[in-house]
Image (cartoon, rainbow, N blue to C red):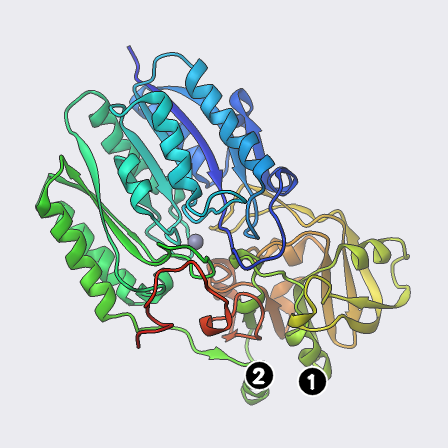
Amino acid sequence: MPSRVLTGLFGHETNTFSRLSTTIVEFSDYLLAYGDEIPNAVKGTVIEPNGVEEVAEFYNWELVRSVVAWATPSGRVTRDAWNSCVGHVLRTAEEGGTLDGVLFNLHGAMATDDHDDAEGVFLEELRRIIGPDIPVAITLDLHANVTDKMAQHANIISAYRTYPHVDQIDTVKRAAAILDRAMVGKIKPISHIARRAMLTGLDSGRTTSKTPMTEILSQADQQEAADPNVLLISVQAGFCPADLDQAGPSVVVCGNGRNERYQAIAETFMDFAWETRHFDSNVYLSVDATMARLKELGPSNGPIVIADCSDNPGSGAYGDSTFLLASMLQSNLDNAAFATIFDPKAASQLQKERINARVTLEIGGKTDPKYGPPLRVTGRIVSHTDGSYLARGPRWGGTTQQLGPTAVLRVDGIDIVVASRRLQCTELETFYHTGIDPREKKVLAVKSLHHFRAAYAPIASHILICDSGGLATKDLTKLPYENLRRPIYPLDIP
Ligand SMILES: [Zn+2]
C-alpha cells in the first residue's frame, strides 16, 4: 500500500509594517490552485509543489492535494484569505481518508489579521485533526521566523540552503527522505529549536560568497554526515520587518527522538550565529552615494545594476518609492532602464495612449508619501504589455509572472517600466517582455535585495546595493516594533 501524504503550499512573507493587506486576490494574482488542478499549475516549475510531485513518484506515495497559494510579500494576510486557504486544507485533511504523513510547503514568516504566528496556528489546527502521531514535514524559506509552536507541531523542518533561493526542489527532497522513513516507523523525527536575542544575523542568509551562512551550512553537512541520528539541520536567517515575539534567526535540529544532545547542537549553532552577527557582505549606499559611485565607475563593459533593497516588494515594500528614480532622472543618465515602479493608475493611463505619444503624468509615490512623493514626468511611450511572461531565471523559472497592465515610458535617457502589480525584479524577462534588452543598457535599476543576483550578476559589470530609505530599509531603528521580544540585537544590544 502506498503511503498517503497530505500536501499543499500556503506561503507568504508578511511585512507587518506594510499598510497593504494581502487578500485572496493577491494570491490568485500569483499562484492559487486547488486539489487536482495542482500538478498542472506547478508542472515545469522550480518551486516546491513540483518537488512534492517528484518525490511522490519516487517514493510511490499517494498524494492528498489541498491548495497551493503564494502571494508577493506585503502586509498581513486577511481573515478571509486565511479562512479560505486554511479552511480548504483542514477540510481536505478531514475528508481525505486515512493519512500516513504530511509534507506541506510554507514560507515561515506569515502573519494574519488574527495570528502573529500564522504557521504555528496552522500546524496546531492541522494537528487537532490528524492527531499527534502522524509525522508532519514542512519546507520553509530560509527567511522564516520559526516559532516554538511550529517546531512543536512539525517533526521535520527543512528550509532552503541557498540565497538567492535556487534549491526549492532539493529542500523538498531533504524533507521527503526523512518523512518516508518516519511513515514506516523506521525513525521518529523530532524538532529541537534554538534562537538568540537577535533579529538579524547570518548575513541575512546570503550564500553567494563565503559568509557565516555558508560556514554554518557546511557545519550542518558535517554534523549530519557524522551522526545518522541527526536527521537534518535547518538554518533560518529570519525575516526582520515582522513585529513578532519570536522573529529572527533560528536553528532547528531534527533528531531521531527527543534528546538533549540535539538541543545542544542547535544551541552551539546559534552560538556561532550570535558571534558572527555583525558580518554583512553588502555595502548599503544612500541614493546620493549610489549616484556618486555610478559617476565614478563611468562607462563599463556591461550594465551597472543598482538594486534598491529598501523598496523591494520581495521584502514587502511598496515598490512605488520615488527616491531613487527622482535622483536618476536628475542625473541625466543615458541608456538606462528602471524596473519597476508600481502604479496601476499611471499604467492604465499610459495604456490608453498610442505608442510614441508624448505624455505628462505623475508616477509612483501613491501608497505612502513618506517614501517619496509622486513624480511628475514627461516622456514618450515605448511599449505596452499585459505584464505576463514566463520567468526563465533560477529563482522562479517555469512560473508565469504577472505585472498586470504595464507600459514603458522613456523619460530622457531612462526607460521606466510602470506596472500594475508589485513584484520583486528577479528575472531578466521583466525587461525583455517589454522590448527592453537589459544586456544593452548602461544602467539597470531593479527593486530587489539579493534575489536579482541569480539572473543579473552574470550580465552585470558592477552591482550597487542602494538603501533609498523605503519601507524595507536596512535601518531597523526606523521601524516601530512593539511586539518583538526585547532587548534584542541590533535594536538594544550592540
Ligand atoms: Zn527568502
In terms of secondary structure, where does tag 2 sit?
helix
- The picture quadrant where one finds residue 24 is top right
Task: Estimate the x, y position of residue 70 in percent, counting from the top left.
Answer: 53, 41
Q: Are marks 1 and 2 in contact (CB under 8 Å)?
A: yes
**Callout 2, which amino acid?**
Leu
Q: Which part of the image, by quadrant, shows the C terminus? A: bottom left
Residue 194's disc is: none
Residue at 36 percent of width and 63 percent of height: 199
Picture layout, residue 72 above or below residue 489: above
In the rendered image, is residue 400 in sight? yes
| Secondary structure category for the residue under label 1 | loop
For residue 331, the mark is 1
Mark 2 nearby-residue class (10 Å; few <14, some 14–19, many ≥20):
some
* Residue in the picture at 57% in, 53% down: 74
Q: Position of residue 229 (x, y in %)?
A: 11, 39
The answer as to whether callout 2 falls within 8 Å of ligand 1 is no
Cα separation between marks 1 and 2: 10 Å
Depth order, front residue of 28/134: 134
Asked whether residue 383 appears in the rendered view, the answer is no
* Label total for image: 2
Q: Residue at x 17, y 22 (%)?
A: 185
Residue sitting nearer the eye, 395 or 370: 370
Q: Is residue 455 above or below residue 76?
A: below
Q: Amino acid at mark 1?
A: Ser
Left or right of 265: which side holds 136? right
Earlier sequence position, callout 1 versus callout 2: 2
* Towards the viewer: 92 or 53: 92
Mark 2 — residue? 294
**Horizontal and vertical percent position of residue 374:** 76, 70
